[in-house]
């Protein structure tokens, strides 16, 4: 049997950062990864928000394996036939320290984990943690599927991703509710770089991030189109119950999205290179489990620390941050020789005082709101119709006034002012 | 008893299907370790290639090889040179175990060349292998037309196995971690001759010389010509979602008469 | 160029006639019961009786006979692949294995899993092996005496260590269905699990056919090695061939015979298998299998 100060399960962004911090503090740390190499099977939409990297790997942009810098972000409202787009772009995001980048997870996660290795962490791949080693009321290590694969450790940090099997075994999760998850599906579509540059009006390493409301074939959720160097990530994030209710297949929903008049011209002629699907902890604060037990911490998606609030889809940055804070807390606990829940309390304290829990608190009402039927179906329809009629020229008929258009469209959609007022208020409180 | 296992490592390139170590080489190590299991055998794993191969050798050590040797040589070395270098290591070995193919060259010729160098027996492309009471290797090898040949081989001998004969055991966690510090012996090897193609390209079927058309009437003769030779591409390419794809396939099967036409009441394909 | 054909018990190996044709009809038959062998299209036949297959001893014995032949070609059949390197060694010349074509100055070989062709400049003397099934054979010449000259050469057998043949088994009965099948549904590395091949078997059964696989799959032990289609597996000759997630490496396709209809499902429209298909469907083979199973289950009597 092998022993370490800390064993980190899962070499995703959370695990890699946790391992890096601990190794730098001189702790012996084992980073266990299921895949043949870090990131091998990991998927996501495609944008990494890198601020946490500044803290861990200053000037990370010199060697990070990225695809494009996001210099343009569009938010699209889609109906079956129409699209209303809010488009923002700035060159500033194309310069250090950069606001966001598209990257392939097999490249990015591998890069991040190798840095942990370089700092002295032991990384073992093709190794699955199959359970916890428990002594009385304390977690004292993990079982792995290797021959004589038990590993003892003073602290176990579970970074094993959404639906964490270890967190469940440790009893940190309440009853799991499907309504708290969305299914993320994504197609990677290859197109020549110059074609992408032209279609998305970008140059060199500039890239685009399009977040879409509607366009998911009536299934509540959201969709996205991200530009890589010579591929596109086209995907949807779908509320599980809704998906189950409508017996539509995820692929069919992506197909419909790709056929939408506002999306088709962007993806046309591309060749499908990969289709992937993955769960996302969607409900935000509502579903965050207990973050610690004696001898164990949970970070990243494993702790549901993923911000999936409609037009926001951030998880890698939350994972990196929570991984780092978990590591600091573990180190602190090792120093004070108190590995109990209270000894590890530094973790939650750190999360609470940083964006990790603050953003979650601030946006706690947003997921429900954004995924509500009105926001999903009614508002996009009304908005699109209003805009269409504002800009349509009906000569010889005179232009109708905005007030009248809104009134009519609102009636047509059966939209109630008090609902709008309530949602607007929720929105202001939510995003405010 | 000493056993030499030969692993060919191919550096990662544009297509990782051809990178690393072949399934056949993995199987070869497993067979070697099993041979070792029922004796006090000492398993050495060797590769002829660049420094990049050492990670693969460590993996072999983690899985049970006791000694790892890298014969320093460039990639694309001709098989004769590779075999010569490996034969030089095989001196005291009762068994030399190889895979049936390397990932890039895949000619399956190195093992026979090693046997030739050593002037010993060979048993190649085995789909089954085990030892009998007298310590002879009992092996099954493929022949043409699905026939199989049962062999009995006395050591010393060179053996090559297909990937399917054995699943390579996993390294224990302790061994996996220990192997990272494992020493790898590096010996100087041949720097040539290397295989240098004068031209490279994607695979294109060779225009096949067609057998004389057979069949009674002209039509069947022509059809036999048309349909003969996998080289002739006369197809249509369609991109479809799975449901449509399946429907389209069944449609073609109907059109070509492989499945009965739709009978009434059946849902349309 | 001279063809050297290892013969077992009067039977020619796969690719023998192609190799002889590639060498313009000059051939040395070596092995046992050569008298019963009938080689179509050969012009100059020499026979060397050396008994049962023994690559080491055969090579040692043939040394003198072949010493002055600049280019010696064998079929890349199991026995050819065994004998060629031993010959190359005793003749002290390089070996070029698994070629798809052999010409006096250029040899073309498949590389990287048979998806690339490399052309090598030939500097005789060499020994080469020719991939069976890629060349085809010339139409039988109408002339009555089409066997050309034929004479027996007697060589004294030089014995070196060889493996002892215990027995030769006929094709595995459990796979007769495959070798005899005129409809085959085969799967490759594009399929995502061992379970897919059970599904594939059911689908094959639904269209009255058999299931086959590529070496990548048999190497994973997802399917028994006896279901591997190709030159080192079983050589089949179906009317209808359905391929799912198969790239169409030459070593696989040359084991296919001449199917009249080929349907392929692959995400890569440019791979050789799709190129040689009557219907090439670009789609995820795994989902297509699910759909096909439903469809064949419901709509086929
Ligand atoms: C469709 C989709 C789009 C998304 N888009 C974005 C985006 O654009 N930007 C963004 O920032 N985030 C995005 N996210 C969220 C983001 O992917 C996750 O929040 C993030 O990956 C969480 O990182 P993690 O390290 O916590 O978990 P993961 O990245 O899931 O890593 C978990 C690791 O643990 C390993 N593992 C699991 N179980 C075991 C075990 N038992 N033993 C050993 N190893 C194990 C896994 O192999 C994996 O490597 C998206 C997610 C999805 C599904
Ligand atoms: C001496 C020698 C002898 C050999 N003998 C044989 C033999 O007898 N038989 C044999 O089969 N091979 C043989 N091989 C191996 C051969 O060269 C190839 O490596 C092998 O045939 C490739 O098998 P594959 O097509 O399944 O795998 P790959 O070449 O990896 O092809 C997989 C295919 O699946 C496609 N794909 C991937 N994902 C999907 C998806 N989701 N949906 C649809 N398609 C997908 C890919 O585009 C690719 O085309 C031999 C090789 C050598 C060197
Ligand atoms: N460079 C090499 N180093 C070690 N073993 C090799 C090398 N090349 C080939 N082999 C062995 O010979 C087998 C057949 O290789 P090949 O003849 O290249 O198809 C491989 O499976 C290996 O076991």
Image (cartoon, helix red, strand yellow):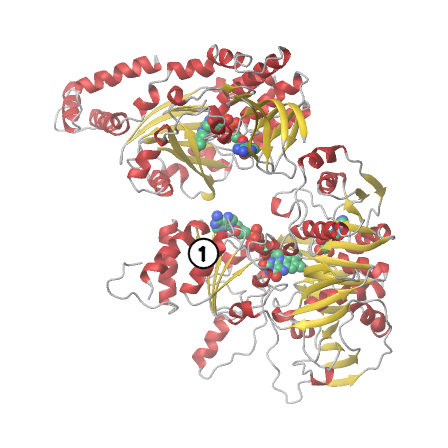
Task: Give the answer, above or below, for where B112 lies relative to A376.
Answer: below
Q: Quadrant of residue C44?
A: bottom right
**Residue sitting farthest toward the front:** A136
Residue B180 vs A16, above or below: the answer is below
Which of the pair A207/A292 is nearer the observer? Answer: A292
Quadrant containing the N terminus of chain C is bottom right
Question: Residue B100 is drawn in which quadrant?
Answer: bottom right
Displayed quadrant of residue C50:
bottom right
Q: Which residue is located at x 72 percent, y 38 percent?
A: B55
Q: Which residue is mark 1?
A: C199
Residue B2 percent across, percent down from the top left: 83, 50
- Report ligand 2 position as a quadrant: bottom right
Residue A211 visible within the image = yes
Instruction: Judge whether B89 appears above or below B257 on screen.
Output: above
Residue A19 is left or right of residue C281, and the answer is: right
In the rendered image, residue A23, in percent from the top left (x then y), is placed at 66, 20
The chain to which mark 1 is attached is C
Visible residue check, residue C69: no
Report x, y in % for residue A82.
27, 33
Residue farthest left in this picture:
A397
Label 1 packing within 10 angstroms: few (<14), some (14-19), many (20+): some
User: Residue at position x 37%, y 21% from top?
Assistant: A286
| Quadrant the C terminus of chain C occupies | bottom left
* Tag 1 secondary structure: helix
User: Is label 1 within 8 A of ligand 2 (CB to nearest ligand atom)?
Assistant: no
Number of on-image labels? 1
- Expressed as whole percent of the image width and height from the top left, the position of residue B137 reads 76, 61
* Camera-nearest residue between A199 and C280: C280
């Amino acid at each position: 049997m092998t022993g370490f100060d800390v064993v980190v399960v899962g070499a995703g962004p959370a695990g890699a950062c946790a391992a890096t911090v601990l190794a730098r503090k001189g702790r012996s740390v084992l980073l266990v990864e299921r895949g043949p190499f870090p990131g091998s099977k990991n998927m996501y939409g495609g944008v990494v928000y890198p601020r946490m990297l500044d803290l861990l790997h200053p000037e990370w942009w010199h060697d990070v394996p990225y695809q494009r810098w996001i210099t343009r972000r569009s938010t699209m409202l889609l109906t079956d036939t129409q699209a209303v787009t809010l488009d923002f772009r700035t060159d500033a995001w194309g310069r250090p320290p950069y606001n966001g980048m598209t990257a392939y997870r097999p490249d990015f996660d591998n890069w991040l984990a190798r840095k942990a290795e370089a700092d002295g962490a032991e990384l073992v791949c093709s190794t699955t943690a199959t359970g916890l080693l428990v002594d009385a009321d304390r977690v004292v290590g993990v079982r792995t599927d290797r021959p004589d694969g038990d590993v003892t450790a003073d602290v176990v940090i579970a970074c094993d991703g959404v639906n964490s099997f270890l967190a469940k075994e440790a009893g940190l999760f309440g009853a799991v509710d499907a309504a708290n998850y969305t299914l993320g599906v994504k197609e990677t579509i290859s197109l020549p770089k110059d074609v992408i540059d032209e279609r998305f009006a970008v140059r060199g390493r500039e890239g685009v991030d399009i977040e879409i409301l509607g366009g998911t074939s009536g299934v509540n959720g959201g969709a996205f189109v991200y530009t890589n160097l010579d591929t596109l990530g086209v995907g949807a994030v779908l509320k599980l119950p809704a998906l189950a209710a409508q017996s539509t297949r995820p692929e069919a929903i992506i197909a419909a999205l790709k056929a939408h008049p506002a999306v088709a011209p962007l993806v046309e002629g591309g060749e499908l290179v990969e289709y992937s699907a993955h769960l996302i902890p969607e409900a935000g604060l509502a579903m965050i489990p207990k973050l610690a037990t004696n001898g164990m911490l949970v970070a990243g998606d494993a702790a549901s620390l993923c911000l999936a609030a409609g037009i926001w889809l951030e998880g890698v940055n939350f994972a990196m941050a929570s991984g780092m804070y978990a590591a600091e807390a573990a180190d602190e606990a090792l120093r004070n020789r108190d590995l109990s829940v209270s000894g590890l309390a530094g973790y939650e304290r750190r999360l609470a005082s940083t964006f990790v829990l603050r953003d979650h608190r601030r946006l706690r009402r947003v997921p429900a709101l954004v995924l509500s039927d009105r926001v999903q179906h009614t508002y996009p329809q009304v908005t699109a119709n209003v805009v269409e009629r504002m800009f349509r020229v009906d000569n010889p008929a005179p232009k109708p006034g905005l007030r009248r258009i809104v009134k009519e469209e609102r009636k047509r959609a059966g939209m109630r002012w008090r609902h709008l007022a309530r949602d607007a208020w929720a929105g202001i409180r939510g995003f405010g | 008893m000493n056993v030499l296992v030969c692993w060919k490592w191919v550096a990662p390139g544009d297509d990782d299907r051809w990178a690393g170590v072949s399934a056949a080489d993995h199987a070869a190590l497993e067979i070697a370790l099993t041979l070792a299991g029922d004796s006090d055998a000492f398993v050495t794993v060797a590769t002829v290639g660049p420094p990049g191969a050492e990670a693969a050798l460590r993996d072999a050590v983690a899985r049970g090889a006791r000694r790892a040797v890298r014969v320093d040589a460039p990639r694309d070395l001709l098989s004769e040179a590779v075999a010569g270098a490996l034969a030089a290591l095989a001196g005291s070995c009762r068994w030399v175990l190889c895979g049936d193919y390397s990932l890039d060259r895949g000619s399956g010729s190195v093992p026979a060349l090693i046997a030739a160098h050593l002037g010993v027996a060979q048993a190649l492309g085995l789909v089954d292998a085990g030892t009998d009471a007298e310590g002879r290797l009992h092996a099954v090898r493929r022949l043409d037309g699905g026939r199989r040949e049962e062999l009995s081989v006395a050591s010393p001998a060179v053996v090559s196995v297909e990937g399917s004969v054995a699943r390579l055991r996993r390294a224990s966690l302790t061994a996996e971690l220990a192997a990272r510090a494992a020493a790898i012996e590096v010996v100087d090897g041949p720097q040539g001759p290397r295989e240098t193609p004068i031209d490279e390209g994607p695979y294109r079927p060779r225009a096949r010389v067609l057998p004389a058309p057979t069949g009674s009437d002209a039509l069947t003769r022509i059809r036999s010509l048309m349909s003969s030779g996998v080289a002739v591409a006369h197809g249509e390419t369609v991109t479809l979602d799975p449901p449509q794809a399946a429907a389209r396939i069944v449609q073609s099967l109907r059109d070509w008469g492989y499945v009965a036409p739709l009978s009434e009441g059946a849902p349309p394909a | 160029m001279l063809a050297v054909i290892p013969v077992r018990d009067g039977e020619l190996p796969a690719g023998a006639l192609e190799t002889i044709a590639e060498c313009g009809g000059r051939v040395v038959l070596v092995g046992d019961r050569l008298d019963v062998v009938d080689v179509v299209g050969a012009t100059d036949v020499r026979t060397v009786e050396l008994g049962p297959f023994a690559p080491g001893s055969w090579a040692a014995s043939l040394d003198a006979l072949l010493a002055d032949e600049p280019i010696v070609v064998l079929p890349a059949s199991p026995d050819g692949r065994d004998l060629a390197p031993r010959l190359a060694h005793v003749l002290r010349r390089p070996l070029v294995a698994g070629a798809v074509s052999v010409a006096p100055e250029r040899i073309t070989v498949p590389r990287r899993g048979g998806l690339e062709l490399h052309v090598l400049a030939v500097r005789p003397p060499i020994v080469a092996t020719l991939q069976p099934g890629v060349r085809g054979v010339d139409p039988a010449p109408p002339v009555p005496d089409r066997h050309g000259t034929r004479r027996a050469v007697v060589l004294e057998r030089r014995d070196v260590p060889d493996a002892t043949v215990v027995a030769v088994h006929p094709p595995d009965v459990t796979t007769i269905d495959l070798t005899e099948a005129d409809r085959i549904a085969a799967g490759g590395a594009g399929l995502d699990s061992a379970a897919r091949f059970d599904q594939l078997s059911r689908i094959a059964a639904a269209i009255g056919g058999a299931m086959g696989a590529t070496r990548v799959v048999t190497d994973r032990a997802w399917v028994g090695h006896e279901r591997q289609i190709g030159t080192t597996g079983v050589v089949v000759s179906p009317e209808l061939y359905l391929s799912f997630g198969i790239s169409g490496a030459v070593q696989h396709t040359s084991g296919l015979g001449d199917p009249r209809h080929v349907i392929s499902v692959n995400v890569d429209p440019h791979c050789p298998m799709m190129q040689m298909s009557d219907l090439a469907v670009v789609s995820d083979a795994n989902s297509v299998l699910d759909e096909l199973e439903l469809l064949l289950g419901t709509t086929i009597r």
